Amino acid sequence: MDSQFTAGPSPDDRAGRDSTAGDVPGPWSPASGAERASLPFDVIIAGCGPTGAMLAAELRLHDVRVLVLEKETEPKSFVRIVGLHIRSLELMAMRGLLDRVLPHGRRRPAGGFFAAIPKPAPEGLDSAYAYLLGIPQPVVERFLEEHATALGAQVRRGCAVAGFEQDDEGVTVELADGEQLRSRYLVGCDGGRSTVRKLLGVGFPGEPSRNDTLMGEMHVGVPPEEIAAKVAEINETHRPFWLRPFGGGVYSVVVPAAEVGDRAKPPTLEDFQQQLRAVAGTDFGVHSPRWLSRFGDATRLAERYRVGRVLLAGDAAHIHPPIGGQGLNLGVQDAFNLGWKLAAQIRGWAPDTLLDTYQAERRPVAEDVLDNTRAQTELLSSEPGAQAVRRLLTELMDFDEVNRHLIEKITAIGVRYDFGEGPDLLGRRLRDIDVKQGRLYDLLHRGRGLLLDRTERLTAGGWSDRVDHLADPTAALDAPCVLLRPDGHVAWIGDDQRDLDDHLSRWFGRPAD
Ligand SMILES: Cc1cc2nc3c(=O)[nH]c(=O)nc-3n(C[C@H](O)[C@H](O)[C@H](O)COP(=O)(O)OP(=O)(O)OC[C@H]3O[C@@H](n4cnc5c(N)ncnc54)[C@H](O)[C@@H]3O)c2cc1C
C-alpha cells in the first residue's frame, strides 16, 4: 500500500458559513443541531488573556460558535513573561503559528530556569524545539487573539462578566452593564482574581502572598556600566532584583516591595525609588515610567475545574510565583487540553467522561507546577539553610538525569497523563518527527486526531470524520502504530485493529453511521 494521509473536512472546507449565526450541524453532530441552534453561542469565554484566546482558537477549529468577553477596552501593554517554553512552542508548531511568532522573539538556551540556577540544558532534549523563545506577553496575546479571530471567534472588549446562572440547557451570562447573553457553556479564563471562579463558589485554597515585587519600565539616570555592576553585586544576596536595558534608554526594573500591597492599586514611581534605595543604596535616577505594577508570590489551586456547564482554565484555576516562567505556558496548555474536548461535547460525539478528563489530566499538572515554584521560591531565599540547599542542588544538577528531570518539568515536555497501564510513551506528547509528508506537527494544524500507522494495515474507519490516518512505514517512531489525540498526546500504541477500535471509541466516541 502506498503511504497515505486521509483527512476529513476542515473548517476551511466549510467556509462561507456564518459561524456566529444559527449554525448548520456539521458532520459530527447528528444529535446536537436543534439544541445548538436554540442558543446564539456555544461557548462564552470570560477573559481574552493568553488562555482565553488560545481556547477560542481551539474551539473554532471545530466550528464551535465562540464569544470572548474581555473587560479591558485595549490589549494590555505590561511585559510580564520571560518567554515560551518548549511545550508551548510545540503547541504553536502544531497549529501552524510558530513560524509567524518566531521573528518576534529571541531564541535563548532552554537551561538555567530552575530557581535561576545557571546550568546549561543537557544534550539531546526530546524536542525539535529545544529552546526558550524570549517574547513579551503582549506579543503572544496579540498573536493568539488574531489567530482566534481569523478562525472566526468573536471578541468583545470593554465587557466584564459580572454574573451568571446555569440551567439544563445552558448558561445566562450577565455583563457589568446588565446585558444578558446565552450560551451552552461558560469558561472562566479571567485570571487569578477570577470573577467566574468566585461566583461559582469554587474554593481556591493555598498560601497568600508573603512577598510582593515591584515591576515596571522606566528611564534611568546613570550609565549602563554602573547599573550592571551594582545589579551583579546585589544579586549575590537579593533576588528577584534586576534592571535590564530595554532599548532607547528604558530599563525593565524589578525590586522587592516594602510590604504586601493591594494588587488592584498600582505602585507609584516613589515606591520604586524608595525600594531601589533600600536595596541598592541608589535609585539609579529612575524617572518617566512607561508602566508600573506589582506581583505577589501567592500559591493557590482551584478545588474543581468544572461545575456543570462552567469551567475554569489558566490563572483562574491556579496561581503561583512567576519563578521559572511557567504561568502563561500552563494556561495555554490547559486551553489546548480543554478545547477539543469541549468541542466534542458541543458537536455531540464526546464519550460520556471525556470532558471530565480535563480536570483529571490538568489539575495534577498544575499541582506539580505549584510545588516546583514553592521549591524554587525557597531556593531563592537568602537564609543560610536555603543557600546551602541551593549549593547542593547546583552540584546535583551536574548529573545529567537531575538536570534533565528539572528542565522537563519547567518546559512541560515531561508531562505524562494517566491513561492506564502501557509503554512509557502512552499518555506523553509525541515530539515532532519526520514523516513522509514532511513534519508530523504540520499534519495536526486542524486539531483532529491522527493515526500514525507504520503497519499500513490499520484504519480509523468509522472515525475518519474526526481522526486522520497517516500510513507511513518510514515514520521515525519506535512503535508499530500510535493514536494521537488532537493535543498531540499518545492515546494508544499497538498493532491490533480491535484494540484500536476500542481506544478510538474511548477518545472519539461512537463511529459515524
Ligand atoms: C512578573 C511576572 C512574570 C511572569 N513571567 C512569566 C513567564 O515568563 N512565563 C509564563 O509562562 N508566565 C509568566 N507569568 C505568568 C503569566 O503572566 C500568567 O500566568 C498569564 O498571564 C495567565 O494567563 P491567563 O490568560 O490565564 O490570565 P490573564 O493573563 O490574567 O488574563 C485574564 C484576562 O481576563 C480579563 N478579565 C478579568 N476579569 C474579567 C471579567 N470579569 N470579565 C471579562 N474579562 C475579565 C483580564 O482583563 C485579562 O485580560 C508571569 C507573571 C508575572 C506577574
Image (spheres, rainbow, N blue to C red):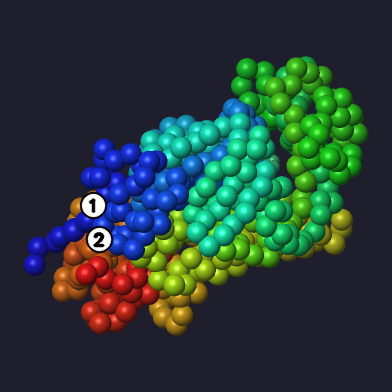
The residue closer to the viewer here, 110 or 85, is 85
Instruction: Left or right? Give the position of 496 relative to 78.
Output: left
- Which one is nearer the viewer's eye here, 371 or 483? 483
Residue at 56% x, 53% y: name it: 171
Q: Does residue 307 appear anywhere in the picture?
A: yes
Query: What amino acid type should be assigned to the residue bearing mark 2?
Result: Asp
* Quadrant of the snapshot with the C terminus: bottom left
Image location (x, y in percent) of residue 296:
77, 46
User: Residue drawn 14% across and 61% down?
Assistant: 3
Q: Residue at x 18, y 58 (%)?
A: 5
* Residue 434, above or below 359: above
| Few, some or many residues within 10 Å of mark 1 (<14, 14–19, 20+) | few
* Quadrant of res 451: bottom left
Q: Nearer the viewer, residue 58 or 458?
A: 58
Query: Residue 372 appears in which quarter of the rendering?
Result: bottom right
How many labels, in total? 2
Disc marking residue 9: 1
Q: Which residue has dot 2 on it?
A: 465
Ligand 1 within 8 Å of disc 1? The answer is no
* Residue 10 point in image, percent of width and height: 27, 49
Position of residue 63 in the picture relative to residue 342 (left or right): left
Q: Position of residue 17 (x, y in %)?
A: 29, 40
**Which mark is drawn over residue 205?**
none
- First-in-chain label (2 vs 1): 1
User: Element at badge 1?
Assistant: loop
Quadrant containing ligand 1 reads top right
Cβ–Cβ below 8 Å for labels 2 and 1?
yes
Can you give x and y, in whole percent of width and height, for residue 375 in the image?
Answer: 73, 61
Q: Quadrant of residue 433?
A: bottom left
Q: Is residue 231 left or right of residue 26?
A: right
Mark 2, ligand 1, within 8 Å: the answer is: no
